[in-house]
Image (cartoon, helix red, strand yellow):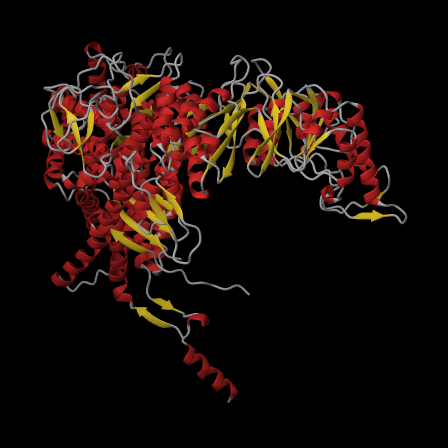
Amino acid sequence: MSRVCKKNPSLCTDEPLAHAEVWQRLTLLRHILSSCYGPFGRLKQIHNNVGGSVLTTSTSSVLLKAITFSEPLVKLIATSIVNHTTRFSDCGLFAGIFSIALIENANRLGLAAGIGSQMYKYLLKECNRYLSSDGCGCKVKVDFSSIHSLLTLAYSVITSKQACMLTPCEAQYITSLTVQAFLHSVPCDSSSRTCFGRTVTILLEGQPVSNSTVFPGLLVEVHELHFTDLKKLGPAPYKIVLFSTSLSGDLSEIGDMALEIHTGVNPEGALLDQLLKLGKQVVRDGVGLFACQKVIHPVLQHYLEEHGLVVIERLGVSLMEPVAQITGALIVASPYSPVSAHVYGRVGGLSLHRHGPKELLQLLPFKDPAVSTMVLCHRNETMIAELKEACRRAEHVLRLTLKEPYALLGGGCTETLLSAYIRDMSESKATEAAQAINCSPSEFRLGTEAFCCSLQSVALSLEGNGQQCLIDLTHGHCWVTAVDTDSETCSCGLSKNRPGLEKALLNTGSHSFFPAAINKFDHQPKLLDSFTAKLSALNMAVEMASLVLDVKYIVKDVN
Amino acid sequence: MAKTCVSESASLQASLSVVGALECVVRRCVGPEGGSVLFTKDTGETLITRHGQRILTSLHLDHPIARMVLECVCAHDRVTADGSKSFILLLATLLRGIRDSVNRQHKATWNLATPRNLANRLLAFCWKELDDVIDHCVVPYASSLFLLNGYRLEGRVLPALVRGYVAGRVGIGQAEILTPLLCELYNKVSDEQDHLTEEPIAFLNSNFSLLHITVSGLPTGRSQVVEGIVFARDWSVWREAPHCGPVKALIVSQCLDKPLAAVGENVSICFQQDWLLHSERIMEARLAAMLSLQAHVVLSSVKQPERMLEWARENSLAVLECMDSEQLELLCQLTAADTPPLQPMLRVVMLSFYRRLHPGGGGVAQLGIPCCGFPHAHTLVLCAPTAGALEQSMCASRGTFAMLQHLCHAVLRRTEQTSETHTLNDSCTRETERDGVCEACENHDHHDQCHIPLPDQSSSGQSRGPASPPDLWDVILKAGGVLPVGGAFEFLLHHSLLHCCNHGDTQSRRLLAEAILSMFRSLHSHKPRYFLQHHTHFMSKLQIMKLGHAVRELGSGSEFRLALRPEGPASLCVESVCSKHQLVVSVLQCVSRLLCVGAILYIPSLAQRPLTTCSEESEEENI
């Protein structure tokens, strides 16, 4: 009998942006995001009301995945930030803060939705043009001949993740490890291979951060293996065979067919015989290392060990590809046919490491492998999870530089510089631009104001307790200082303080000026952001703001 | 059990209140200045849309009259893929018009013109006269409007059409990106040739779901058109092509270790010592046979066993598993797949290339199809920050091709009807020459060409030389298939309904004319001056055209703007006349359907009955 459920009519909200409640929630999300931003960002702790695990983080993607939102518009923004970070791993908070600030400012200055999104689109185009032009003041070319810009990029990512709880010294150390792992993952012969190598991460809880290391090759967890076992093998290199199928001798992989078993036939015995036949062949071929993704039958295992082979079982699906990559072995999928000679791979060497409770076997690559293993240590579970995330992100950011070898100034300098440029540009081109996008010059001015304010409010989120954010009126860089004191350099470190350098508080309506270029050879920037990720975040934020401003009606299905 | 809720006299009232409520939702998102509607579900899905039909469907309408309206809207949308929002607006104004005229007549005479009577007369008018009015007053005007060179369509007709359609369905930023992309897709699929048939459009319309993929998390600006067919799956085994140039690919539609016996039947195998090798041997034989075909790629619609992947790795073949079978069918169809002898489960196709694309992170497989004219398959890669926005662009793109197909179909059919003996090109000029006004225009047009250089595309169509074949869109333009958006059709129809005295009865004509104009007026209720200005401007220009003199003034074109949005002709948008025509027809049908309703009977089902009545009934039964 079918049950007919009556569908409830949907709930409608007209003009959602006219409701105070919606604004309150948008503002709340902006507060949450902007208080996480930058090196002085505050941590967020998330726990539910029935106990369970407590999450401490300041990373946008982790945070937004853990929170559930009731307001559809807020949910829309959160989803887009999460989507962005899965693609680019960086600048999620920037995109969120900027996007909500754009919506709020459009409303505060009374811009109509249509005009607002047209203005934003126009100004975004200007930003894109400026950022991709050669004369751009906030762009730095990544110099691959020195390690400095790579270190700076990675350092900026790792220090912005507060929940890692690293001391400055530890942060430096982790940064250098990350860059090292990245360099390992770039293949040497770029002619034939187009893909990156990989970095496998192993987490060790309860050890000091300084125990973290990067190994070339792979580390595989093993049990009950001794140095003597390795000595039996003789000199490197060793032959390796790699199985992806279960060697347990079960009859599990037959499928849907019905089996008719004659009396007197022992299926288990037949299968084991087959496995031992395989073992004999492997021993005859002089294999040193026998690895299997799944379980190996104990009898076979014993047989192999007796003949001096090193056996690794339960390798796991995630390690299969890396092992195949560093050894050049072809994965064997069937135990029933003889192993052909060309599926064997080679291991350059084996060594045993002990890290805390774990016993790890290091497989050294035979040729150029581009595979490395990063062992990360930290004091507790939450911190180590965050540290792993941070390192993964930093490495992704470094990879993005290979596509577009640029970086943007960090520490809010890009935002202030861009806002100064946009303000100056729109002043000079106000009438013709207003005509081009079909609005009045006053509306154009309001739109510019909203856009620049939003950019600066991202920079404003960087200030910590008892600090103030300033913009200098020559270069347009951002200065974060304690009240009534002066700092040596601007927050990205490119501009030096000098007497007579005029400064104004952010978002306090200073006059417009064209940001003058700085001779970049004097100093190296202290903080750098990913160019690709930030450019995409900028575009995405404007798009989301237009989308949200455009929503005139919300229909909520409650079935 | 049934109870009557709406009496006959109140059926107009009921429809009015229902349609009025729908109008409130729909009005927010009409036209380029409208916004969008956000749908959320408790499951967490969100959808942003401006698509009229989707909005109405997602409302889960419960009222029977609302459901009737929705049915009509869906039927209309299936035909034209356009105008479902205008449908509701026109329906509302028309119903209001009927109510007013009924009220007025009640007061003046005691002649009972019931709403139903009026609706039937309107429908009769629609069947008998509306085609004539549009053919003789609107279409010639539309064709002469562009022939006169009053509007210069910078570039082609197609971008203007697409822009007009897309602008009403996605935000401004997205529309700007989508328009050139969709035109690019059309041009590439039709292989850059100016087809005079609707084939490329029909191909795109029917296969759009297979010719696009979506990528979330990237800005919309990263969308692109790529060659070949893209499968939203990564290669299971990836090997680079050994050489550039065509490669052979095998298509497998069955798991390779399945025995050849009928599927679904249980095969019983005697378990003997050599059984293990037996099933292996079947597969070995098949793989060896496949290898002998010397292919580089294996495409499979199902998951293959590990053994097969191992074999592919050994022999340097690329393998793609779990492919969408419909896409695979399209691939076979486009590449003329053939079945090799002795291999019943295999098909062999030639690919021009195979690649691995990385649209933001994950890889997808791209297969190139050897180009031999139309259709040259290309795929649209759509990017957007969230799934909701993605869905919106996807819907707009799909709708564009449906709308274009309807337009092509309608115009080509009409031109064929009007002159069967002449060629397509002749027929459309013939049609325009029927009207006296247009003859003058044509004369002027020739005159005009001497000193004003025309945009290349329209001039190639106009100078009817044998060397320059016209393109499909120019034919449509000449045949009066399109009009500028923003009220041109409404003004024209309103005007011609009022001034063609020899058609139908006056009352229904007047009613329809007023409804059409007031629908347009209500759209511009926030700036009434804009509406009035354009209306008077249009009327004066139309007067000049009717009189047939001072044509030269018209030809100057620069100031001749008819309800244009002020961006000027550079971003001129056009819409198709036939879908507007269909809109009026559908609305009139809907009105007569609504007003035919005499009463609505609610029959409560068993489940909804209150508990007390149930128990009473059971007691009665016991007695």
State left or right for residue A438 relative to residue B475: left
* Relative to B341, residue B39 above or below: below
* Relative to B46, residue B458 above or below: above
Q: Residue at coordinates 33% horizontally, 38% vertically from top-left?
A: B579
Q: Quadrant of residue A524?
A: top left
Q: Quadrant of residue B547?
A: top left
State left or right for residue A423 relative to residue B244: left
**Residue B99's spot in the image, x, y percent?**
20, 57
**Outermost residue to the bottom:** B623
* Relative to B106, residue B266 above or below: above
Query: Is residue A394 or residue A321 the one in the foreground?
Result: A394
**Residue B32's spot in the image, x, y percent?**
24, 36
State left or right for residue A383 relative to residue A324: left
State left or right for residue B273 relative to residue B554: right
**Residue B49's spot in the image, x, y percent?**
33, 42
Query: Is residue B122 or residue B146 the one in the foreground?
Result: B146
**Residue A555's spot in the image, x, y percent?**
31, 51
Query: Is residue B559 or residue B166 the one in the foreground?
Result: B166
Query: Is residue B368 or residue A105 the one in the foreground?
Result: A105
Residue A285 appears in the rendering: yes
Q: Quadrant of the N terminus of chain B?
A: bottom left
